[in-house]
Amino acid sequence: MVVKRRLNCGFDFSGVPKAPRSTRRKVSSERDDVDSQLTAFDLLASLAGKLLEESESSSTSTYGDSQEDHLVVKIKQEHELVYNDKPCKSELSHQGNLSSKSPSDNTSETCLQVSSLENDCVLEQTPVSDCKMALGLKQPLLGCGNKKEDCAVLVEQGEATNGLEDGGLIADTFSLKGPSHESVHLDGVPNGSLEGYRNHSKLACRDDDDENYCTYYKFGDKCNKSYRPMTRVGYRRIKKSMMTKHGRAVSRSKCFEDTRTDGCLKSLYRKRKLCYGYNPWKHETVHRKRRLSDKGLVVTSDGGLSSESVTNSPQKGESVKLSIKSFRIPELFIEVPETATVGSLKRTVMEAVTALLGDGIRIGVLVQGKKVRDDTNTLSQTGLSCRENLDNLGFTLEPGSSENPVLSLPTDSTNLSERSSASPELNSRIPLSLLHADHMINSGTCVESKQELVPYQSDITADEQQQPSPDSRAIVPVPPLEPEALAIVPLNEKPKRTELSQRRTRRPFSVSEVEALVHAVEELGTGRWRDVKLRSFDDASHRTYVDLKDKWKTLVHTASISPQQRRGQPVPQELLDRVLAAHRYWSQHQVKQNGKHQAAAMMVVESGLSM
DNA sequence: GTTAGGG
DNA sequence: CCCTAAC
């Protein structure tokens, strides 16, 4: 099996096949110009940054709460088969040795908590000092909940990285620790149980009302090889969700059962800043750990970027008070070789997150788990006029835009649905990735779905999806908490490309582009695609010279077949004739001649003769 | 990093 | 558009 790495993040690839350039390039370079998009998140981030700056001088923030703030990166093994029917203990017994708690990192962090009060968005600065990363494993956690598929390994984040290559860690949970927590954090906080959250002994197993949660450590090749799902021998997939955590309990909304964590907006803000060239994460406050397998590793995040735990305060009059406790990073798929270092893993996750956020994020509103798509309705009309309902209010950070959208996509998916013959309501629940981009493009309204670029999944969807088929974790944006969508998702279908390396959105060449291409090739020939790119498509960042080469290839083919056989947007015959002429000419003259003008002139003559 | 060609 | 090989 060929191991494929999806990111180029400075791994040491020596000895292993290199990842395709096209893939490695993806994360970092294909979003250069996407930051111009002003999204709600931008506003939020800007506000956060502003307030952060202002508060840096006068740090009078609420320290009390801050110590309970921490960011947790959860990684969950997607292959529940690994754990099913296997006592956790047996897997754990010989695995306590990776523990390498490293309280050396004294990085001080500042988290921002966002709350909206009386229509004014207030950012409370809540410094979190000493966000340690101790990538060590705590003692094996022997407890195991009912849902073994949820078994995960908690790993303290830190500098300690050695030994992981050999560890054979099955599943992990990353946790960003708050200052007051020396121990492992569970990724879920029992309702209202901060004490339990802090209690190490209770960390072993979360047993929520909603779900039992087993966390444990698992090491050794035995685990790796014995229980590896047969479907993906060479890979490990780990569900990972990044979320912020807060010690105190918040909403009991069923919608956010696994996300009752407090927010650290700063984290998002900082990620966002990365997109602008500033990389505060270089200081590594992100805590990630990896799961290692014999060949590769896939880290994914849990579903949709759903803001969790919206709390509210008693309201008076018309106003609505709410606070956003946390945001979650959308689905992330990462593959790294097990020979990669932890540091490179960090970079990988960093790049993935950056790429994700860099494409822009939109805010979605959920009411009782249902996505509210009509932006025109008032809150009261949406049913958000009372406090009780506010408990069911949620937000999602949705995949935003891609670069240079042809048309601005509406913030809701109604538009997409309308193009389909089926009912909008139904289609609104269809994972966008299942709506082929080709269809949308060829349907005449050339709107590129932004959402197909960066999918997300809701917690429930992600979790439920992985159960019937580990490999079914398609990168499909499924509206959060709309279980109906599950019936549509082909669970048995094995998506070819998940992870980050999604296929680029198809961007048919326009006639003008074809004309420019033909013109350039007429002068430069067919062996200088880089020059063609620089000459005529230098400003089209989405057109690589490989694209141009490929397009020329198809143009030649198109020009060679009968018009009846051609598909897609018709290319003027005049251009096709020029294509054939240039192709003929350069096939004979190669690229050796530098006398471009002369060559071009000769070509014109010859093409004239042939025509 | 580019180019060429198959998929 | 992706992937790989070759340079």
Image (cartoon, coloured by chain):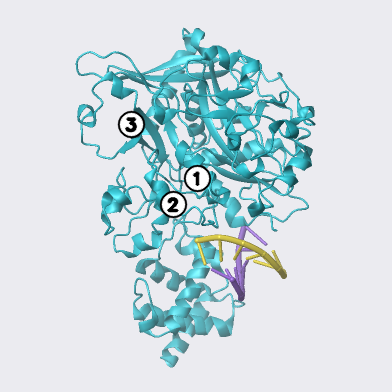
Chain colours: A cyan, B purple, C yellow
Please tell me in which quadrant of the rendered image residue A76 appears: top right
Query: Image quadrant for the C terminus of chain A?
Result: bottom left
- The disc at residue A519 is none
Q: Position of residue A535 (x, y in %)?
A: 48, 63
In the image, residue A22 sits, relative to residue A37, either above or below, namely below
Residue linked to disc 3 = A368
Whether residue A221 sits left or right of residue A119 in the image: it is right
- Mark 2 sits on what residue? A489
What's under tag 1, amino acid-wise? Gln
Question: With A249 as the anchor, is A89 left or right in this view?
Answer: right
Please state, as top left, top right, bottom left or bottom right, where the N terminus of chain A lies in the image. bottom right
Name which of mark 3 and mark 1 comes first in the sequence.
Answer: 3
**Residue A479: x, y in percent?**
38, 42
Could you tell me residue A610's position as x and y percent?
Answer: 44, 92
Residue sitting at 79 percent across and 39 percent down? Answer: A166
Residue A205 appears anywhere in the view: yes
Marks 3 and 2 sit apart, C-alpha to C-alpha, by 22 Å
Residue A287 appears in the rendering: no
Q: Which mark is residue A465?
A: 1
Secondary structure state at the residue bearing disc 2: loop
Quadrant hosting residue A155: top right
Disc 2: CA contacts within 10 A as few (<14), some (14-19) or many (>=20): many
Mark 1, secondary structure of its residue = helix
